[in-house]
Amino acid sequence: MLSAQFFSRQACLWQALLVSKAGRCCCRFEGHKTPWAAQRGKISFHSGACSLTRVVLGIETSCDDTGAAVVDETGHVLGEALCSQKDVHLKAGGIIPPVAQQLHRENIDGVVSDALSASGISPKELTAIATTVKPGLGLSLGVGLAYSVKMVNQYKKPFIPIHHMEAHALTIRLTNPVEFPFLVLLISGGHCLLVVARGVSDYLMLGQSLDEAPGEALDKAARRLYLVKHPECSAMSGGQAIEHLAQQGNSLHCEGFKLPMARYPDCNFSFSGLRNDVNRLILRKEKEEGLQEGQLLSCAADIAATVQHLITRHIVQRTHRAILFCKNEGLLPPKNASLVVSGGVASNQYIRRALRALTDATEFTLLCPPSRLCTDNGIMIAWNGIERLRAGLEILHTAEGFRYEPKAPLGLDISDQVRQAAIKVPRLKLRS
């Protein structure tokens, strides 16, 4: 069994490498200028070349997107570029770290050059270089860090190491006038956590996933349903395919499922058990329809709707407890408190609607960055660099010897206090 798994994995690796060599399945979004600050009522857009403000280059390579952007301290995105590896990894059935590393190496120079060219800023004019160094895939993080070290040494610029999850958390301050403190729900393919953001580099961790992330659960469900064979979903990521197909389905199958961790009065998450239950449902339906694994089920849309609804219910229930805990402990303003939702899964509109129902019921304000800023990008890294530059936090004058960290917590963990509070969460009816 182990031998078969090994050779299957190696076959996927070589397939992905062949695809990347032959077609460079990597979409380049050309560098461009975006006046995000205008949305916040800040000063009008101006070109980078005329800017007298501080300017940061952000570099992102934590997973499978190579991103770079130039942002100034007024919130203007002067230039950005992004290269996605989605098509390559979709064909391989998942992200293969060595392939991601190789594609980052091939694309990072072009991506950074495009972002700088679009900004009108030369490397010598940069105030600092900010780079994702934690958490993420070690092989991917290493590419961005090595490239940044070379730039820092060549142009004698300060280096700002960035925590990937903090960058997601603070992106909202680029697009909206949000003051600290606020509650953050970060949901993506690699992470799921609830934190109170009290300031730059100042977070209270209320809960996090104990196994896999929601995006990972959605992707695995899509792979088990073989949605890549579905004519409407063949070019979509797993999460996108589930959301798309769920619109055509009915989550009637939800009645046989229990909410994960219902007996645990904390804000932690668990998605692996829920996914295993869905796998058993799929197996049962395959037997009922007389299908072999790999053939499309006639009820695939219903199962997609079921998966999406179950994951949404779990996210909303844990977030509800976090809101109640923050209210009880006075961690957020008594009026006009905000829930910020970011990360790739925050682009899912069904989950957003459910969270809006929650914030409406609890008198919170729901804030989400634009969908393209929810997924990994260089803009959020550069903006986090600006935030740290303003706060004077961890501005390094050498990057030599700096190490990336594949695993890294965000803030002070107070999940035990949440558990001890044992807050009961009232049932919130969600539309299925």
Image (cartoon, rainbow, N blue to C red):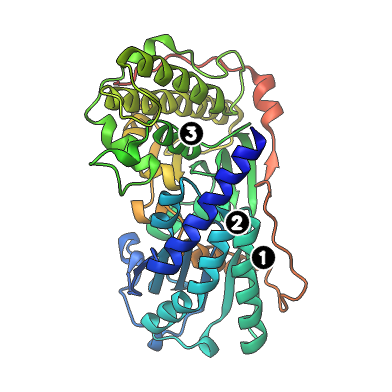
N-terminal of the two: label 2 or label 3?
Answer: 2
> Closer to the observer: label 2 or label 3?
3
Question: Which class describes the residues within 10 Å of circle 1: few (<14), some (14-19), or many (20+)?
Answer: some
Are dots 3 and 1 in contact, CB under 8 Å?
Answer: no
Query: Between residues 389 and 249, which one lies in front from this camera angle?
Result: 249
Q: Secondary structure at mark 1?
A: loop
What numbered label is drawn on residue 349?
none
Question: Which class describes the residues within 10 Å of circle 2: few (<14), some (14-19), or many (20+)?
Answer: some
Q: Residue at x 44, y 64 (%)?
A: 20
What numbered label is drawn on residue 393?
1
Which residue lies under the disc numbered 2? 200
Q: Secondary structure at mark 3?
A: helix
Q: CA distance from mark 3 to mark 1?
A: 35 Å
N-terminal of the two: label 1 or label 2?
Answer: 2
Q: Residue at x 34, y 68 (%)?
A: 29
Q: Is residue 228 above or below residue 36?
A: above
Amino acid type of disc 1?
Leu
